[in-house]
Amino acid sequence: MSKIKRGVSLYSYQNETFQGKMTLEDCIRTSAELGARGIEIIGEQTFWGWPEYGAADADVENWHRLIKQYDCTPVSHDFMLDYKRYKGRIMPFDEQVASVKRDIEFGARLGMKFIRALVSIAPEVLVAAAPHAEEHGIKILIEVHAPLHFDHPWIVRHAEAFEKSGSDALGFLPDMGMFLHAFPPVWKEKFLRIGVPRNIADYIEKAYADRVLSEYVILEVQEMGGTGPAIAMAETLRHNAAFEPKRMLDYMPRIHNIHGKFYQMMEDTNGDCVEPSIPYDEIVKVLQQGGYEGYICSEYEGNRWIEDAEEPDSVEQVRRQQVMLAKLLGEAEVPTIKTSPTASADAEATREAAE
Amino acid sequence: MSKIKRGVSLYSYQNETFQGKMTLEDCIRTSAELGARGIEIIGEQTFWGWPEYGAADADVENWHRLIKQYDCTPVSHDFMLDYKRYKGRIMPFDEQVASVKRDIEFGARLGMKFIRALVSIAPEVLVAAAPHAEEHGIKILIEVHAPLHFDHPWIVRHAEAFEKSGSDALGFLPDMGMFLHAFPPVWKEKFLRIGVPRNIADYIEKAYADRVLSEYVILEVQEMGGTGPAIAMAETLRHNAAFEPKRMLDYMPRIHNIHGKFYQMMEDTNGDCVEPSIPYDEIVKVLQQGGYEGYICSEYEGNRWIEDAEEPDSVEQVRRQQVMLAKLLGEAEVPTIKTSPTASADAEATREAAE
Amino acid sequence: MMDNKMIVEGSLQSEDGGFSFLGRLPYYRGLGLSMIEDIQVTVDGEVQSRESVRFSVRGKTYTLDEMETVYDDRWNFGEKAKIIVLNGGLAAGDHQITFAVRYRVSYLPFVPTTKDTKDLALAA
Amino acid sequence: MMDNKMIVEGSLQSEDGGFSFLGRLPYYRGLGLSMIEDIQVTVDGEVQSRESVRFSVRGKTYTLDEMETVYDDRWNFGEKAKIIVLNGGLAAGDHQITFAVRYRVSYLPFVPTTKDTKDLALAA
Ligand SMILES: [Mn+2]
Ligand SMILES: [Mn+2]
């Protein structure tokens, strides 16, 4: 059995939580039933009022109660650091550091091991906050996300700054969307819906499979008569200029969490599940080769690509990914949901209606 | 002493040869005097009429005579393969392969070890031509050039196809312009001349040094009020999304020639020479670490960035780069030009005037 | 994202000197109010002036200019804000409302505007 | 590149039914003629029609439409081609000539147009 553990970022259920169709308990229970017991959150999504109002003690107590009740483990609080909070000027350095410190404290309060930093944050800010993270038993992980990748000069600069800092409270959280080896079908379908001619969409999909340099594809689409949406579809190829999972191997000692990004999980009649555009078989192999023992947290992002045509079913999508991950990790049991994913929300609605 | 050898691509002298100020003999003699005895050419530049008219026997004999006279070694014939020769359609596959075969034969006729393929050529074309290359003792080298790099999916596709072919007649020719670690001063000066405001040019230069993701820089320039040339200057950052010389190490068995691309060689009062934007010290270290024993061929490309303001002095630029390379390679002697670089052209002009 | 969930169905109502509806931020998290750059409301094809728009959450009401320097309040994830337009009022009946929000997201190399259009009925 | 060396100084002369000058391809190599997509000549601010332009190298003369399917001839590196414009002729004296070439380069993800402007004198 693999030492890699399964988790879910509650980002995955955003379509349901946005509408109040799932409560925090629904999210945690559903993940736990799937055996995905590592729970990652975006603090601002899960805790009403964070950061401007702080987080209410009652809410934090509720969090710990649910984590305990469903035998889960807090993994990561993903923070945002809005350094463009002031119009027309960037937040001063000291204020950025202070903001990161508050997120460190919040992460610790929630029992997290990690807080996720966005890649747009300057490495100096994180280096300055690192001692505070060490004191609170937190590691700050930069999310390496397309169009960035482990060979991008900006990421190399972070890695150099981390090494120079001497702190092991600084690390990386690679988002598997980096390793897009095929054009996602849900992207193509969305671009078709907004008016990209079929022949152009087919060409772009094939050019991506053929790994053609984005600039050639953009020119070809122009020559095919493509306009607005077709150019936008071609320009998405600029986002993936490198996608070798093996490049994570250089950084394993600093990789502590993984975003299991996916756009669409397909299921065949045998119940086998696959992400057609992200090579999870290869990814899992590389992570095992690198001795990774952390979580892969499901991060469903197909919602935004299909919502104009159909209501996303985030739970079913997460379930399929967990089925795939469990199989790739050599688990014998197939993850299954036992309780209605909206049970708590439904109960609340019933209570409210009765009042 | 290093086993790495010095050479020149005659591309470097294009400004002079275009105008007839240097002959082929001037180019070869000047390079030889600098101790850069590996000679690389672009067939179509050096051999009048190639490929449509073939190359005249007299011209090829002249080539061999000069190579012998100046104790040089033919390194590479850089071919072009104009697969867009027919308007509106791509040259058929078999015709592309046949065209490459003619360049293989031409390279062999010139005594070259390598022919350089452009990276836009499909790997299948090169794989199909590989047996012909083997028969003629030629290796076909794909030039890995920014915006491509050794982790780009297109290059990985080539590498996979080369491995699968089982042929060692297929390889890589990395162009050191890939490893641009600073915004070249001659680029900045040109952009200033065509109207980029000073503050924006300064910002872009610094953002490049800070290794900021190109898309952020483009947004920032827009917000600074940048238009046409300023956006174009920012967009050059899209060209370098990865610049780690160490990535060549994965491919050393297939790397057989190096383009010593440079934009501007600065010389200090001690005669020390440096390329401010390309880290040749680090590059030479990596190549030595990888056991490289081929040529680094000077490839001067600053000409096009300064010609609107001043007449390029290609020979002086090549001389400085050779001084730098000789030093980095541990050579005791400082490369020096003894004969006027235009001696043969001048003699020809005198002869013609006398007729 | 959540584009088609921005306007809350059935939420159109009259206000003193105008009308209101409930609107949600089309985003997977909330945002501090200073990062809401603009809210544009169009009614039956007619763009309402920026000056006429008010944003109201949890009992506090702001003009769009005021919001630009509000650093201690937010528009939470999924939160239904009341969007008030002081246009003098609307006639009872059906109206086509377009609700567009421009918001500044620190990590994005562009400033997105997202909009939703729905037909809402104003009770007589 | 070589932009400012495209028009050969002092090369303007009269031709039957027009004028000519010598032009070079702004490129570090030559090109087969089928890859020359367009040559546009402007004289004293007036764009000359594509139909009026002839391209001539080594004794062979082509219209621009003909060139598009010429696969056995080239415009060599640094070669001075005679660019003929059949516009009825120019008056003696100074003329401002702009010479623009659009050429299709297989490996470029765009189709460059490069131009040069020079004042040339036509002998009386
Ligand atoms: Mn992610
Ligand atoms: Mn090169």
Image (cartoon, coloured by chain):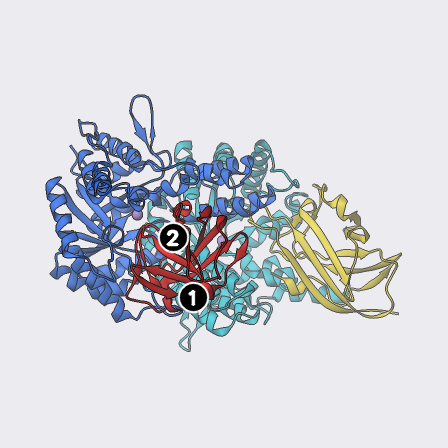
Chain colours: A cyan, B blue, C yellow, D red
Q: Locate residue D1 relative to residue B220 in the image: left or right.
A: left
Q: Decide: is A327 above or below B34.
A: below
Residue C49, horizontal then vertical, whole percent: 79, 54
Q: Residue A286's image quarter?
A: bottom left
Kindly indicate whether the residue at mark 1 contacts the one at mark 2 (C-beta within 8 angstroms). Answer: no
Residue B111, horizontal then vertical, whole percent: 13, 51
Q: Decide: is A28 above or below C93.
A: above
Identify which residue, B130 or C90, lies in the foreground.
Answer: B130
Q: Which mark is residue A101?
A: none
Q: Residues within 10 Å of mark 2 (few under 14, many from 20)?
A: many
Mark 1 chain: A
Q: Residue B52's image quarter?
A: bottom left
Residue A111, horizontal then vertical, whole percent: 53, 45
Q: Residues within 10 Å of mark 1 (few under 14, many from 20)?
A: many
Q: Locate residue C70 relative to residue B268 in the image: left or right.
A: right
The residue under label 2 is which amino acid type? Gly
Question: Which residue carries the number 1 mark?
Answer: A275
Residue B228, horizontal then vertical, whole percent: 55, 48
Q: Decide: is D121 above or below C16.
A: above
Question: Which residue carries the number 2 mark?
Answer: D23
The residue sitting at 40% across, 76% down in the picture is A270
Task: Please state which of the two labelled residues, at mark 2 or mark 1, is closer to the viewer.
Answer: 2
The residue under label 1 is which amino acid type? Glu
The residue sitting at 12% across, 59% down in the picture is B136
Identify which residue, B96 or C32, lies in the foreground.
Answer: B96
Q: Residue C86's image quarter?
A: bottom right
Residue A146, can we see it? no
Residue lying furthest bottom in this view?
A269
Identify which residue, B218 or A240, lies in the foreground.
Answer: B218
